Amino acid sequence: MRTTGPEGSVTSDVPEAGPRAEEPRKLEARLTDADRFYRAFVAAGAGTTLVLITLIGLFLLTGAWPALKTSGFSFLTTLTWAPDGEPPKFGVAAMMFGTFVSAAVAMLITVPIAVCTALFINEYAPRAVRRSLTSLVDLMAAIPSLIFAIWGLFFLVPLLAPIEDWAVAQFHGWLPLAEASATGGSLFNAGLIIACMAIPITTSIIREVLAQAPRHECEGALALGGTRWGMISSVILPFGRSGIVGGSMLGLGRALGETLAATLILSIAFEIKPRILENGGITVASGIAIEFRDAQELGLSALMAAGLALFLVTFAINLLAALVVNRSPAGARA
Amino acid sequence: MTMPETTKVLPNPRAAEGRQPASPPAAGPRGKVPPRRRPRAWRWTDLAEIAGALGASAALTWMIFGRLLPFRVMPLAYVVLGYVLFLPIYWFVIRDGQGATAAKDRLVTILVATGALFAFAPIVFVVGYVVKRGAEVLRPNFFTETMQIVGPLSKATEGGALHSIIGTLEQLALATAIAVPLGLLTAVYLSEIQGPLARPVRLVADAMTALPSIVAGLFIFSIVIKPHIWLQSGIVGSLALAILMLPTVTIAAEQVLHVVPGGLREAALALGAPYWRSVLMVVLPTARAGLSTAVILGMARVVGETAPVLMTTGGTTVMNLNPFSGHQDNLPLFVFTQIRSSQENQVDRAWAGALVLLAIVLLLFVLARIVGSASPGRRRIRVRRRRGSRTTSDAGGNRS
C-alpha cells in the first residue's frame, strides 16, 4: 500500500517499514516546486516590507541632510524657524521643548489614572462588568485623535478656563509655572488633551500586564489575611512594575507624535518658557503640519530633519519600552 | 449535640473503602448549611460609614466656603474641597472601627475608583458632546450633497460631505489593498518560515509603529508630491495611510498566527501536505477570525488619521470619484477645515462630520469584536466542504 502526498512530497512505504524497525527509517524532507515558489513568494513579501520601511528611514535621512549640513549643530539649539529666510536660521529647540513639555504634562496625568483604571478593572470592578469595561477602554483607544482634539478645543478648554484664570490670579508672582498673560492656547492644555488620548492605550497595556500576575500568589496573600490593598501592593504592583513602565513609555511615544491636539489648541510661538499655562508654544508635529505648505527647498529639508529627530526620539522610547516589557516576568509570559 | 451530628462526624468505614457516594457536602457539623462567608461583600455598616464621612465633609465644606471665607467661590471648588476633606474623615472613621490596615485599604479603594472615574469620564463626555453637537446639524442631505454650491455663509444644515465620505472610503480601501496583502505575507514569513530576514523585518516593523503619523505624511509629501511624481490626490493619501497600517497589521497578524496550535501544522505535514497547503488550508483558516480582527483594527486606526491626509490628498469641496487624479477630500480633513473656519455655521457643520466619523470608527470596532469573537473558521470551512461534496455526490470525499 503506497501512500503519496497530494503533491508527492513525502513518499513512504508502510509495510516495508515494519520489519526493519531496528534501523531508523530515512526521512527525506524535499521541497516541492510549489513549496519553493511559496517560500520565495512569502519571502519576497517580507523583503518588500523590509525594503519599503528601510527606504523611509533612508529618504528621511537624505532629505534631511541639506538642512542638517546648513545648520550644523545649531539645529539643536536654535529657537527660530526661518529656513527659507536669508540667511536661513532654524532649529528644533523650541519645537522639542514644546513636544517634551506637553508630553510630560500628559504623562503626569496619564500614568496614575491608567494604573488606577487598570487596577480597578482587574481587581475592584464586579466580575460582570469587567469585560465591558475592558472593551470600553479598547474602544476609547480607537477613537480618532481628531475627535479628542476638537472636543478639547470646544469643551474642555472653555470648561477649564475659569479654573486656570483663577490659578493664575492666585499663584501669579510666586510660582513661575502659573504665570501667564493669557490662558487657553497653552502647552498645559495641549498636554491635557493629549492625556485624554494617551490614557486608553496606556491603560489597556498596563491592564493586560497586571492581569498576568500569578493568581495563586494573589490568593495566597488574601488567604493570609491581607486586605485587597495589601495583595495589590505586595503581589500585583511588584510583579507588574516593568509592565507599568513599559506601557507608560508606549503611551509617551504616542503623546510625542500627536499632531492635532497641538495644532488646534496651541497659539504658535517659537520660544522656550517655564510658564506652561500661558498661551503659545509649538511641538515638532504641529510645526510640521503648519509649516509644510509654505516650505521651499531648504524649508522642506529642515522639516524632514525635524521629523527625523522626532522619529528618532519616539523610536528610542518604543525600543526602550519593548526592552522593559520583554524583560519583565509578565512580558516573558505574554 | 444531637445524634445525627455525631454519626456524620465519625469516620465512615465504607467511605474509607472508597467509591461510596459521599455524604452531602453541604451539611455542616451543625446539621444545617451555614451562610456563605463573603469577605468582600458590602454590608450596611460600610454604607453608613461612607454616608457619615460624606455628610461630615459636606458640612465642613459648607462651613468653610459658606461661613468662614468672605468671598464666593465657584461650585467646582465645593466638590474639590469636599472630596479632599472626605478622604481623611473616612480614614479616621474606618480606623476607629476596624484598624489602620483596613482604613488604608478603604482609602486606596476610593482613590482607585476616583482614578478610574477620570479615565471613563472623557469617553462619556466626548461621545456625548459629539453626538449632541452633531445631531443638531446632521440632516439626510449631509450624506447626499457636496460642498460645491455651499458658500461660507450658508446655514450649517446646508451642504453635505458625500464627497468626503466617498473619498474616505476609497482611500481606506486603497490603503487596505496595499497594506494588508503585504502585511499578511510578512506575518506568514515571520511566523511560518522564520527565515534569515525575520529578525531585521521584525525590528523595522517594531520601529515603524513608532513613526508619528505626521512624519509618514511628510515623507510621502516630499518623495511623491514635491518632485511632481504624482500630484495631491487620493492615492497619495492612501500611500501615507498604508505606511501607517503596514506595521500594525503585520505585528497583529503575526501574534495571531503564533497562537495557531503547532499540532495542527504538524498534522497537516504528517498527512503529506506540502508547506504551502498546510499554511493556506490549515494555518490561515484557523487564524481567520483573529486575522480579520487585526485588519479591521488597522483600518479603524487609519480611518481617523488627519495629519497624513492633510499633507497628501489636497482637499476639495467638489465630488471627485477618481482617487488617482485630482484633489480628493476626506472625512477627517473635512472636519479639520470646517472647524478651523472663523464662521460659526461652518464650525457647526464640522460636528456633523465628526459624528459620522465617530460612527464609522464605532462600526469598525464593533465589527472587529463580532468577527473576533466568532468561532474559529474551521467549522465554517467544513460546512462548506460538506455542501460541496454533496453536489459532487462523492461519499468518500469526507473521509479523506
Image: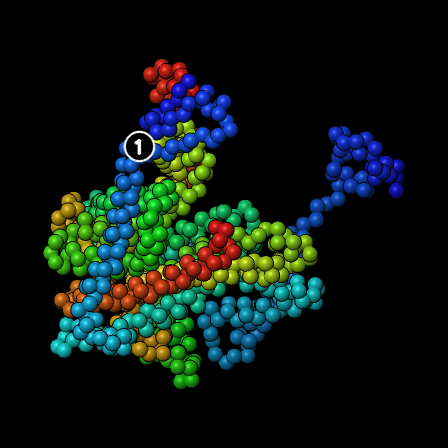
Measuring 38% from the left and 60% from the top, which residue is drawn there? A319
Residue A179 visible within the image:
yes
Position of A212 with respect to A250 (left or right) is right
The chain that hosts pointer 1 is: A
Measuring 35% from the left and 52% from the top, which residue is drawn there? B199
Which x, y percent locates residue A57? 25, 59
The quadrant in which residue A193 appears is: bottom left
Measuring 32% from the left and 51% from the top, which residue is drawn there? B201
Measuring 47% from the left and 31% from the top, which residue is drawn there? A24
The quadrant in which residue A29 appears is: top left
Which x, y percent locates residue A1? 42, 18
Task: Give the camera-side residue of A115 and B294.
Answer: B294
Residue type for callout 1? Thr
Is label 1 in a helix, a strand or a loop? loop
Residue bearing the label numbered 1: A32
Query: Is the image coloured rainbow, by chain, by secondary structure, or in one colour?
Result: rainbow
Which x, y percent locates residue B7? 86, 36
A195 w.r.t. B233: above or below: below
Other-residue count near label 1 (Cα within 10 Å), few / some / many at <14 / 14–19 / ≥20 = some
Position of A231 with respect to B320 (left or right) is right
Task: Give the camera-side residue of A212 and B321.
Answer: A212
Quadrant including the N terminus of chain B: top right
